[in-house]
Amino acid sequence: MKNIDLSQDIVPVSEFRSQVSHWINHIKDTGHPVVLTQNGKSVGVLLSPHDYDALQYRERFYHSIEKGLKDAEEGLTYTTTQVKEKLVKALKK
C-alpha cells in the first residue's frame, strides 16, 4: 500500500459524495488510500481491495506468529518425530 499524500488523498465526505467515481478512479490510478473527513476529522479510509486483502493477510500472519510464540513459551511444542507420527496417522485415515 502506498503512503497517503496529504495534499491529494484527503477529502471531505460531502466532496466525496458528489464525486464518487472520481475518487474511486483516484484509488485505482494512484494506489493511494483516500481519507474521508467530516468536520475536519478523519472518519474513514477507502483503499483498494488488494490493499485490504494484504492488511487482512498481515493481521492473520502476525496473529499466527504471536500464537506460536505463546505456545512455545508454554511448552506446547512437538518434536520432529512426534510431528511425523501425527502426519502418518492422519494420512492413514
Image (cartoon, rainbow, N blue to C red):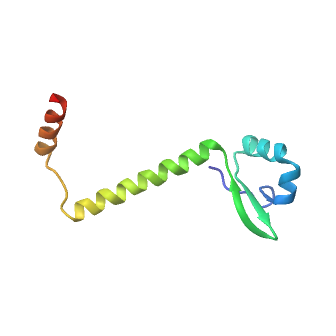
Residue at 83 percent across and 42 percent down: it is: 21
Image x and y of residue 27, in percent: 74, 45
Image x and y of residue 62, in percent: 42, 56
Using residue 86 as the reference point, say whether residue 53 is left or right of it: right
Residue at 80 percent across and 70 percent down: it is: 40
Image x and y of residue 35, in percent: 73, 59
Residue at 84 percent across and 52 percent down: it is: 17
Please tell me which residue lies in front, 61 or 1.
Answer: 61
- State how many labels appear: 0
Residue at 23 percent across and 60 percent down: it is: 72
Name, please, the residue furthest toward the front.
93
* On screen, residue 71 above or below 41: above
Image x and y of residue 9, in percent: 77, 56
Using residue 54 as the reference point, say whether residue 61 is left or right of it: left
* On screen, residue 25 above or below 6: above
Quadrant housing the C terminus: top left
